[in-house]
């Protein structure tokens, strides 16, 4: 019994040593409230939003004062997340790209306001305005580039050709606005910046970051994608408990860095040290750099810097604190970093799990730290909600069809209930989506707690999200769509279903697409491949961008291939689903052709489906509603039951055979 007691004491002592090593302050410190908030809010997100694990760190004056990890990195082996476990940080990577570029500025090798073409001869577009894009515009989202090359950007392995593929797809694209005019979030801009960094430095982007950033700042657990040979990586699990394929992000400069919460804190010491950047470059890195039309003449919510989403986070600016923030989100991970340079304070929060509100968690922790250090007063202000009011008659003129990159909506007004009514296009009709009440503060308040404002500006109308009480900041949510007298009917796109033909065996972006017409908008078509997007017809066989303020836009082009109509958009190609042939009642052998394009079949009955899959092959099953119901990339168990009318995709190398059996 005495021996057992000694062992227990040793365990407690070792446990306390581990906690101290992890940077957990004693009770009653200025960080106590922040730690409590971190634990409560992180566990809440993990338990309610399909999160698998998390990590958080607080740095004060160059020292980690709190670091804690939550959940398992590997449930099968019962391995917990620890301080060295790597997470994908998503778009937080953008601030690393900005620093890498600024280091080249310090070396006299790059000028921020020089045209990109000075450093990157292979950067070309059919839109001649591309020659006006400067290096700065790539980093502050004012380039006007369409958005994001999604093909092979996220997958179960890396794509070493991602930069070249992105430059190739941009060649046939146009800009959505004049370079420098406004800031619209643009991943492709950072990928082009990555190409500039590689060209000018003579090194790979990954090697340059290792030499210029990771090593000087002692970021020993950071790398482009996961460190080679590293097994300490957190994995992501579905709500069902099944394991998702490990996510590799090939778009390094825009979202492909992997790191830890403590390493991200170490990165921010760059702002008050001379280890990486000159004083002049630090000023450039931390000042607002967004385009003048970003919020249609209003105070912008997203005050972009070079790589940053916020160089003055509104919630803290109202308290006299300058806080810089950057969010990150991939298909499997969510993150946020918040830094107050004058206080030398940083909070970093990482989640394994998509669509988790890492931003609010990080902000709450930082607020508690600042309150604990008596830098701000306790924030417990309560305001009476504004009262319902009568919609001004002039507002009714702003009714019409609006669009963004993922929705087409009709806005109308109900003068009896004084509400703004929104309906969304679902592919066949406009369906009621939201109702927001007009109140005496001049905004429309939705049940979700958001408040909106409609504003005419520069010949168009805009739906704005308003944030703040006395001094609101705004972000464009959608813009009005002008009716046109188009000579094009769009009949070639009408009521068409499209199946992808060049998806790889590792790509996470897999969607059957749909195109069609909207009766109330002649001259336009819609494209739905996971997001409902509006495009303006350029001809009977092509359609282009029709919005300035939307991110991740596309162009469509129809081509004749072997007597059939194919669709190209971005780096994806599709063929008509109507031409997919049916599987024989008992099965068949499916062979991949010489060009290596995906093959498709459909089922005419409900059946038990089984299939031999080549070593580098992949099989996917889509239901009639386009929903992916089986993917051998993350579910290897066959046979499965397939419904009548299912579409089956076979992905492999040229010459690969898939032997399919169907049984009743």
Image (cartoon, helix red, strand yellow):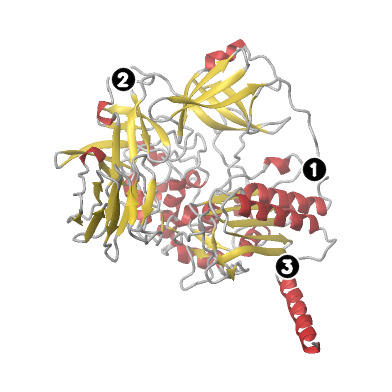
Mark 3: secondary structure: loop
Is 130 in front, or is 588? 588
As drawn, the residue found furthest toward the top would be 393
Q: Provide the residue designation for mark 2.
A: 486
Q: Verify CB contact (< 8 Å) between mark 3 and mark 1.
A: no
Residue 234 in the image: above or below residue 575: below
Residue 640 in the image: above or below residue 626: below
Is 9 in front, or is 438? 9
Task: Identify the residue at image location x=20%, y=44%.
Answer: 581
Task: Identify the residue at image location x=41%, y=38%.
Answer: 553
Q: Position of residue 169 (x, y in %)?
A: 33, 46
Tell me if 406 is positioned left or right of 39 in this view. left
State how far apart marks 2 and 3 are (Cα).
65 Å
Q: Position of residue 653 (x, y in %)?
A: 24, 60
Q: State which tag comes first along the sequence, 1 or 2.
A: 1
Location of residue 467 (image quadrant): top right
Tell me if 226 is positioned left or right of 447 in this view. left
As drawn, the residue found furthest toward the left would be 563
Give the numbered dot on residue 23. 3
As drawn, the residue found furthest toward the bottom would be 3
Q: Provide the residue designation for mark 1.
A: 379
State how far apart marks 1 and 2 are (Cα).
55 Å
Q: Verify CB contact (< 8 Å) between mark 1 and mark 2.
A: no
Location of residue 81 (image quadrant): bottom right
Badge nearest the viewer, 1 or 2: 1
Q: State which tag comes first along the sequence, 3 or 1.
A: 3
Disc 2 packing (10 Å; few <14; some 14–19; many ≥20): some
Give the numbered dot on residue 246. none
Q: Position of residue 518 (x, y in %)?
A: 37, 24
């Amino acid at each position: 019994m005495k021996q057992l007691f000694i062992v227990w004491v040793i365990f407690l002592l070792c446990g306390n040593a581990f906690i101290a090593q992890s940077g957990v302050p004693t009770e009653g410190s200025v960080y106590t409230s922040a730690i409590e908030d971190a634990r409560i809010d992180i566990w809440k997100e993990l338990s309610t939003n399909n999160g698998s694990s998390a990590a958080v760190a607080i740095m004060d004056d160059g020292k980690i004062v709190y670091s804690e990890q939550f959940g398992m990195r590997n449930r099968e082996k019962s391995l917990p997340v620890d301080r060295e476990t790597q997470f994908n940080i998503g778009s937080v990577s953008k601030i690393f790209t900005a620093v890498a570029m600024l280091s080249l500025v310090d070396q006299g090798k790059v000028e921020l306001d020089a045209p990109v073409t000075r450093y990157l001869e292979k950067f070309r577009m059919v839109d001649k305005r591309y020659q006006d894009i400067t290096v700065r515009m790539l980093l502050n989202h004012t380039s006007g580039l369409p958005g994001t090359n999604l093909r092979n950007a996220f997958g179960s392995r890396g794509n070493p050709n991602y930069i070249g593929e992105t430059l190739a797809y941009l060649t046939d694209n146009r800009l959505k606005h004049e370079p420098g005019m406004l800031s619209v979030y643009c991943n492709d801009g950072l990928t082009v910046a990555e190409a500039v960094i590689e060209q000018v430095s003579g090194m790979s982007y990954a090697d340059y970051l290792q030499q210029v950033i990771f090593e000087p700042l002692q970021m020993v657990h950071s790398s482009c994608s996961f460190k080679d040979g590293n097994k300490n990586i957190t994995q992501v699990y579905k709500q069902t408990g099944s394991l998702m394929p490990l996510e590799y992000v090939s778009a390094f400069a825009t979202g492909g860095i992997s790191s830890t919460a403590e390493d991200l804190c170490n990165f921010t010491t760059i702002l008050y040290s001379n280890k990486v950047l000159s004083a002049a470059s630090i000023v450039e890195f931390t000042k607002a750099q967004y385009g003048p039309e970003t919020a249609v003449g209003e105070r912008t919510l997203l005050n972009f810097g070079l790589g940053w989403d916020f160089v003055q986070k509104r919630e803290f600016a109202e308290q006299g604190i300058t806080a810089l923030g950057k969010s990150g989100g991939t298909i499997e991970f969510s993150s946020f970093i918040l830094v107050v340079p004058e206080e030398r304070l940083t909070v970093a929060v990482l989640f394994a799990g998509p669509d988790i509100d890492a931003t609010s968690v990080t902000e709450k922790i930082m607020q508690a730290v600042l309150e604990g250090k008596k830098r701000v007063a306790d924030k417990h202000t309560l305001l009476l909600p504004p009262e319902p009011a009568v919609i001004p008659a002039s507002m009714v003129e702003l009714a019409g069809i609006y669009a963004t990159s993922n929705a087409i909506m009709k806005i109308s007004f109900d003068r009896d209930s004084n509400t703004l009514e929104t309906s969304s296009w679902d592919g066949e009709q406009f369906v009621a989506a939201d109702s927001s009440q007009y109140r005496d503060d001049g905004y429309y308040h939705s049940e979700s707690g958001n408040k909106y404002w409609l504003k005419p500006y520069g010949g168009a109308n805009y739906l704005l999200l308003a944030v703040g009480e006395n001094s609101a900041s705004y972000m464009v949510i959608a813009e009005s769509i002008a009716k046109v007298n188009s000579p094009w009917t769009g009949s070639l796109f009408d009521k068409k279903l499209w199946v992808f033909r060049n998806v790889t065996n590792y790509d996470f972006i897999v969607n059957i697409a749909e195109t069609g017409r909207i009766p109330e908008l002649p001259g336009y078509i819609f494209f739905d491949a996971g997001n409902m997007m509006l495009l303006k017809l350029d001809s009977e066989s092509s359609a282009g961008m029709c919005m300035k303020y939307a991110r991740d836009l596309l162009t469509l082009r129809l081509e004749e291939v072997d007597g059939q109509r194919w669709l190209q958009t971005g780096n994806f190609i599709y063929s008509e689903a109507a031409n997919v042939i049916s599987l024989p009642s008992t099965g068949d052998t499916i062979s991949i052709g010489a060009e290596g394009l995906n093959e498709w079949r459909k089922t005419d009955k409900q059946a038990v489906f089984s299939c031999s899959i080549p070593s580098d092959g992949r099989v996917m099953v889509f239901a009639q509603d386009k929903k992916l119901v089986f993917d051998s990339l993350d579910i290897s168990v066959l046979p499965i039951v397939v419904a009548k009318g299912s579409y089956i995709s076979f992905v492999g190398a040229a010459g690969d055979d898939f032997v399919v059996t169907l049984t009743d």
